[in-house]
Structure formats: C-alpha cells, structure tokens
Amino acid sequence: MFPVYMLLWLSEALADNCSKSDDTFYINKTTGTIWLKKASQQNYDIIIEDKVNSLSSKWLSSDSYIECTPMNVTLNLTECNKANVYILNNTTTKIDFLISSSTCHVTNCTETAILALLTSIQENPKGLDDYKRILNMRAMCFNLFSNNPALKLSYIGVEEGVLHNVLNDSFTGHSQSYNLGDLSMTVNNQTNLTDVTGPMVQLMPAKIFLNNTYYIPETWIPANALAGLPDDSKIVGLVTYKPSDQFVFNGEDIISPVMRIEMKSGTLENLITPLTMTFPLLIPVNFSSNYSPSCQYFNEHGILNNRNNVFWKTDGCLTKTNGKMVECSCNHATPFAVLLIPNLPYDDKNWQILSYISYIGCGLSAFFAAMSLLTYIISRNTSVDNSNSIHVSLSGALFLLNSFFMFNEWGAFLGINGVCIFIAAAIHYSLLSCFTWMAIEAVHLYILLVKVFNTYYRHYMLKLSVVGWGVPGVIVGISLAMQNTNALYGSTHITLADTNTTNTICWITNLSFFYGVNLGYFTMIFVLNSGILLTVTTRICQLQRYSSKGKLGNKSLAWKDICTILGLTCLLGITWGLAFFSTGFYNLPIIYLFTIFNSLQGLFIFLWICGTARKDKEHALNTRSTSAAVNNSTAKPNEDFFPGVNPYN
C-alpha cells in the first residue's frame, strides 16, 4: 500500500548489520522501525505497524498519519548509509522525507494538523485516492477522531465532498463497486430507465462483510425522482459503512449498518414517493415494550450549518419491522441507520396532556418554592430552626429543578450545543440535590424523633449544606469533565408510538450513565427514606395508642396523624418511587400520578412549611400557659421538627 512496505522488504540481515551512527539512515525490517538520524540534528523515530489492509504509524511515540507518493516505488538499497533518504521539511507536528524516488509525509495526530490535511483534500479533490487517504487518516488517528466530535463532523463533511468527486468520475457499465476496507461503495448509472415498469427502481447494493456475514441493505429509489434529470446526472452512490463509530456522538445505539445515498446532481429531498431501504440487524434484538427500532437519518447538513446539534432525527422517516429485518421509508436521501431507542407507548395526545401538567405543576412549584425562600429570609430571627432551614434548602433545590426544566425544550430547540449541555447538567445537578436534601430530611427526622437525646452537633447546618449541595456538584462536575471524551449531556430524543415523531430535549444522552448514576443514587435514598418513614409511622401509631389510653385522643387527632404521614411521604420524596412501579415510566396511569405528585412537590412543601409555622405560633402560646411541671417533663419527644405536645399534630 505504501512505499514503507517496500522498505520493510529489505533483507533482515542487511537491516540488522546497519549501525546507528551519525549520517546514517537505519532501516529495521524485524521491528518495523525506520531510524532517521543525521549529524547535528535531532533523532527521528518512526514506527510502522503492518495491520490487515492498513498501517499504524507512530512518530516519537505519538500517533501519526503517514502517506507516501508514488505508491508503487521499488527501493533497491545496497548499503544503509547510502540510502537516498533526505529530510525535506521538519516541524513539531510534521516531517517530510524522501526515500529514493518516493516522498513520504508524517503528520502527528493533532486536531490542527489533521484538520489542515482534511481542508487541503477538500480544496484539491482527486477522486477515489482521496477516499483512501481520509480512511487511512481516520484509522491511523483513531484515538483523535474518537475523542474529538468537532473533528468527526469535519471529516463527515469532507467525506461527502470526496464521494461527490467519485460520482463525477466516468465509468463504463451499469455500476461500479469499490471495497475500501471500512466501507463498501457502489456507483449506479441510472441513465437507461426505459425498462422500468413500476414506480420504484432497485439500486445495486453496496454489500459489506461484517461478523463473518455479508450484509446487503436493499434499496429502492422512486423512478419519478430520476425521470426529470439529465442523463449525465442520473448517477447514484451508495456507501455502506463497516464501523458506525464515526456517526456516534451521544452514545447512540446503532443496530444496523449505516448507509449513505448521494446523487451526482445533488440531494434528494421532499420526495412524494419515499425511497425505501431494508436493513438487516447486526445483533439479535428482543424488543421489549420500553425499546424499539427506529429508522433515522444523520442530520448532516443541519449540524454542519450550525443550525442545531441533533445528530439523528426521524423527520420524514417511517419504520416497519418484519422479523429480523427493518424496512425504512424516507422522503430524502442522507446517511441512514436503524437505532435502538427508548420509546413512549402513549400517543401524542397523552404526551401533550402530560406536558401541560408538567409545565403547570413545575410553574406552581417554582413559584411557591420561591415564596418559601422569600418567607424564610423575611421571617428568620436569631433563633435558628434547623428543620425549617432544611425544608427551605429542599425548596431551593426544587426551585432550581423546576426552573431549568421549563427551559428544557427551549434549549433543545435553540440548537446551540453549549446551551443544551448547560441546561442538561443544571437539571441533573438540581435533581441530585433534591434527592440529597430528601435524604437529609429523613436523617434529621430520625435524629429528632427516634434518637431524641444527644442530638447537638457543631456546625450542623453547615455540614448538611456541604453534603446537600456539594455531593451533587462533585458528581456533575466529574461528568462534565468527561464530556469531551464521552458525551454525557446534550440533546436527546424520544419517539411517540403513534406518529414516530421525535421530541428533542436537553438531558443525559448516555443510557448507562443515566441508569447507573440516577437510578442507583435514588434507589439508595429511597430505601433509606422508606425505612425511616416506616419507623416514624410506627412511632406515630404508638403515640396515638398512648393518647387514646389517656383519653386524650379523638378522631381529629387521627386525621391529623394521617395528614402528617402523607406530608412526610411527599417531604421525603417517596412519591418518586412510583418510577419503580411504572416499568421505566411507561405505565400510563402511573406516569400520570408520577407527573402530578412530583411536579407539585414544591407547592406541597410550601403548604407544609406554612403548617409548621402555624404550629410554632400555637406552641409559643401553649408554652407560656403550661405549668412548670409540664415544662420540666423529659418524657416527651424532641419537638424541634414538629412543635407541640404531639410533634405530628
């Protein structure tokens, strides 16, 4: 493939007998190393690894891209120190050298250097050779492309231009196929359409060998889309990609080969009769009620034109599943694939209703959470009430969560990647803060009601605040630090069952991260809070029986206790546990209850704070009129959380 191969064909004995002295060019066939060393200059260490149909190159221990021209030079070197190797140019990121009559260029795999190479290819097209060059570039600089989404997007744009250059090359016959290793390409000449009897024209497939099997995505294009074109424009290119990682930006689960359709005359869009593709699935998939295959297209032109950052979309595409095959019908031509996505079995009507409930509930919660904060700041006196401080901290977390949630779809619609990442991270931080403060509520309640004695801690609220606001900050901070290498936040979408349309939101894009962090974090808190709520409920029942024996109980007291338990259920976030009974939020009655209870949680906590404020006043009046014997009693429980003789009334 490269003249470097010719270098490695030299005799091993010749290579091993060469000495690495000054003014010597040392070539070692066994290790695949070219040593370039010249007096008074730095050492050049270029290591070439021969892979299947490709090369891996390292220069000074860094990944690099190497290309040599011409490609068919036979080197005849008899002595190492007389090898015609000349350093033509040397910079920190690039070295050019001449071996016999072949010129080689080695470029470090850095974003600036590789982007410059891509730009030069785009400005000076050479047809099929350029396709080989960019494929080798991506293979040799694999780590760079994997960790740099911006460079991947630039590569995709250059590749589209290279493909159109190939389509402009003339060829004989009905079709021409090319196997370029990582992809297969077929160029179809549809000039002669006189024998077409139906509305669709089947294109010659671009088959790909993957997992010991040939994959052939069958493709039909509407005849009327080609009928009005000049004969020299009826050239259609089909590209089938072996690896799909170049199209993965937000952890998308692509379960079919990716196929690109391009026309020499331009793009096919707004087709009255859609083009049809039949995809075989790469892996056996048992579709559950929570996931389904979705025919989607890569939003190539929208992203490259900076209109939005939604990489995969469903607009204009329909999905039909038939066993292990998925049929896609789309009204435009771009890269296509089948993705495995979480779906919503309820229809667009229920989605609209739930959206209204969410926005109204979150708006009310945000307002009343702000009122809780304002009331706390205005009415706060020198006597610090830890319970109210914790309530208000939870209200603050809910205010952030509800506020950022209401900007969610706006941020996704805006199409600015940085804005969507910020909103998604802010929602995640607020959500984790809510969970953490719910756990703090439970621990504080346990200390007051169960532990009772020896409950004084130095800097108590300061320590709780560090935990309540700090732990979520650490989790989200680490996640944002990983954003460049593994995109965790950004725009994602869900598909409605009846229309197959996509609703885009700013949220966590990696499902493994979503379930591993959120579900794991909440599960621990849910178990803790449920256990404490059960303990508190038991203690309330015991106090109720004690009051009844002393003839102090009545029906109103029982109703107050029931209301207290319901209030604690909301305060400790037990209603969030409905997620466990909804099979991933997909059970319609449960999701309605989940949406109502949790979107209104800020309102419920405001009412709770108002109720405890009223009890504070009643307790102050009772304290002034209570006898000294009652005041000195040590049998009653700690009343810091809920003032009064019975702390739950």
Image (spheres, rainbow, N blue to C red):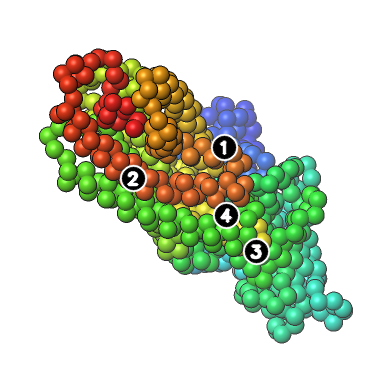
| Spatial CA span between label 4 and label 3 | 12 Å
Horizontal and vertical percent position of residue 108: 45, 45
Which residue is pictured at 71% across the width and 45% down the height? 287
Say which of marks 2 and 3 sits in front. 2
Say which of marks 2 and 4 sits in front. 2
Mark 4 or mark 1, which has the lower sequence index? 4
Residue 607: image tag: 2
- Residue placed most toward the observer, 331 or 150: 331
Q: SS of the residue at dot 3?
A: loop
Task: Classify 10 Å Cα crowding around label 1: few (below 14), some (14-19), many (20 and above).
Answer: few
| Spatial CA span between label 2 and label 3 | 40 Å
Q: Could you tell me if residue 435 is visible in this image?
A: no
Residue 461 sits in quarter: top left
Mark 2 or mark 3, which has the lower sequence index? 3
| Spatial CA span between label 2 and label 1 | 27 Å
| Spatial CA span between label 4 and label 1 | 20 Å
Q: Could you tell me if residue 483 is visible in this image?
A: yes
Which residue is pictured at 76% across the width and 64% down the height? 219
Task: Classify 10 Å Cα crowding around label 3: few (below 14), some (14-19), many (20 and above).
Answer: few
Mark 2 or mark 1, which has the lower sequence index? 1
Mark 4 or mark 3, which has the lower sequence index? 4
Q: Which residue is mark 3?
A: 499
Quadrant of the rendering where the C terminus is positioned:
top left
Horizontal and vertical percent position of residue 421: 41, 51
Horizontal and vertical percent position of residue 510: 52, 44
Task: Classify 10 Å Cα crowding around label 2: few (below 14), some (14-19), many (20 and above).
Answer: some
Q: Which residue is mark 1?
A: 580
Could you tell whether 32 is left or right of 389 in the image?
A: right
Residue 494: image tag: 4
